[in-house]
Amino acid sequence: MIYDTAKNLKLYSSLNPAFDAIAKFIEENDLKNMECGGYDVAEGIKVGISEYEPATGGDYEAHRDYHDLQLAITGEEAIDVLPIEFAKDSTGYKPDIEFFTSQAASATRVALTEGTFVFLAPDDTHKPCIKMSSDKIKKAVFKIKI
């Protein structure tokens, strides 16, 4: 897991060149005024823009085929992150997603606030959509093909 601000995305390009492509996409697009929906960013990278009211989160989720980079455009939510070794009671793997209904250890809570992002690898199970104080969040979820 990486947790930082969007202005620092390019600092991580040595870890994965997708960070540069995502930084360029953010620089070239007005995400605050972008319509909700799916967009192609670069080869192997797509983004979903959504706006919703955070609540209590749901089950933990993990992905096998993609890294997630979740960016708060406006508003805020919390995301609980847990190493996959501590995620329990899988509901079964479906194409690129597996849900877990319980955990064997405490999670780390990340405050996703306007302009911050969290990068999640396949071993980072996560529970997004947890309400903090704002009523709505507009968020970009970048899916980076592994």
Image: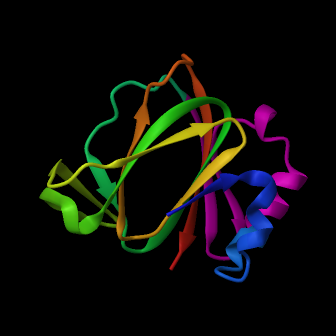
* Position of 88 relative to 77 (above/below): below
Where does the image place residue 75, in percent across and percent down from the top left?
63, 27
Residue 117 drawn at (x, y percent): 63, 51
Left or right, 94 with respect to 69, comes to left
Residue 66 sits above or below residue 57 on the image: below
Residue stretch in magenta: 22-51
Q: Position of residue 94 (x, y in %)?
A: 25, 63
Query: At 80% across and 32% down in the image, what residue appears?
Result: 33
Residue at 53% from the left image edge and 18% from the top image edge: 133
The reply, left or right, for residue 51 in relation to residue 6 is left
Q: Is residue 47 located in the magenta-colored stretch of the structure?
A: yes
- Which residue is more in the foreground, 88 or 30? 88
| Residue 80 location, quadrant | top left
Q: Is residue 46 magenta?
A: yes
**Residue beneath the point at 72% across and 42% down:** 115
Most extreme residue toward the left is 89
Q: Position of residue 43 (x, y in %)?
A: 68, 76
